[in-house]
Amino acid sequence: MASENNPTSISRSGRLLINCAAFVVVTAGIRAANSLFVPFLLSLFIAIICLSPYLWLQKRKVPTGVALLLVILGILAIGSTIGTVVGASVNSFANNLPRYSAILREKTLLITELMANAGFKLPSVPLTETLGLDEPLQLIGGFLGALGKVLSNTVLIILTVVFILLEASSFPAKLRVAFQSPETSLNNFDKVHENIKRYMALKTLVSLGTGFFVAIWLLILGIDYPLLWGLMAFLLNYIPNIGSIIAAVPAVLLGLIQYGFGSALLVTGGYLVVNFVFGNMLEPRLMGRGLGLSTLVVFLSLVFWGWVLGPVGMLLSVPLTMTAKIALDSNEDTRWLAIMLGSSKQP
């Protein structure tokens, strides 16, 4: 009887089930083909960042080919610098990882003995196994190795960026020809593009400052691989809330391994000061009200996109989720989902 009296609710339930099934199928397909999707998504977000200087050069009457060449040369210069730092540092860090782990275990055993002598009751399982302090170093090594493999697809990424930039200027015209009433689609596209471009540009600026000052501080303290940890601080700063914590862990452990607790505290203090200045003072002023994503959604998106796409998915988790939120907010039927993804402080 309920089905005959209320067909609309059944129709909505059916659509919801179909959408959930489609989401599962699409997610499984993306995860199975992540070796194809990861370079494309990375290329797409690089192109979004580069679109502003590309269009700026065109407005200054620079020929399209020359403007594109200048942008690509800039990408290659930055990419080669990152590749050189990552490649050399990862190999050296991987070679020294067993030595670092052994020293860390020795220091942990020393702490265990001091605590036992002080009268603390410790579990029967060794503290080195309980805490697993050397695991963060191994995880960071694996993360950097996976990132290095992605960067090895430089030619494919650069070519994809070139074609995206070439198509970007003609995309609005194609929409006007393809649809009879394209204004809504164009407005939604412009909204998504402007929000992502603004977020990526400001986040890149803040992340550059964070990584630069972290590297300088670690260089002053004499911590091994300061450029590598500065690069990690730059990349992981794209992950709000927990990215800066993850970036600080290996540098703090290296400070403990190399010089002891005093150095580890200095490293921790430096990270706290840099992230407070850039993350809590500068970034909110630049971005206004911020992303409009709840902290839980940010964390879940980090886990989800990291599972689907790997390390690059973690770096792009917030832009991808923000894109989905903007797209959902542009439609009346899905606006409730955008509200659920948003923070409680939204207007």
Image (cartoon, rainbow, N blue to C red):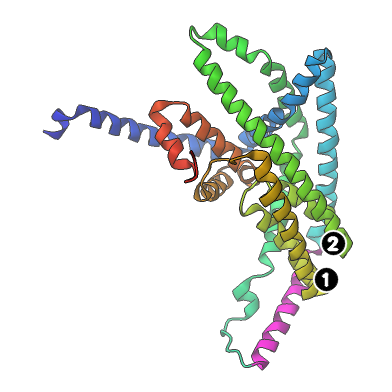
Residue 132 position within the rendered picture, expressed as x and y whole percent measured from the top left: 64, 70
Label 2 close to label 1 by CB (< 8 Å): yes
Residue at the (81%, 61%) spot, across then down: 95
Q: Secondary structure at mark 2?
A: loop
Residue drawn 80% across and 55% down? 214
Q: For residue 84, which quarter of the picture?
A: top right
Is 110 included in the stretch rendered in magenta? yes
Q: Which residue is mark 1?
A: 258
Q: In this orientation, which residue lies closer to the viewer: 78 or 24?
A: 78
* Residue carrying label 2: 224
191 lies left or right of 84: left
Query: Which portion, as a residue range, is magenta?
Result: 96-118
Q: Amino acid at mark 1?
A: Gln
Query: In x, y percent, where is residue 107?
Result: 74, 78
Disc 1 element: helix
From the top left corner, tell me how far across and down residue 339 is, in percent.
44, 38
Tag 1 or tag 2, which sits nearer the N-term?
2
- Location of residue 234 with respect to 139 vertically, above or below: above
Q: Type of residue at label 2?
A: Asp
Quarter of the image where the N terminus is located: top left
Q: Residue 139 occupies which quadrant of the picture?
A: bottom right
- Answer whether residue 84 is magenta in the image: no
Q: Residues within 10 Å of mark 2 (few under 14, many from 20)?
A: some
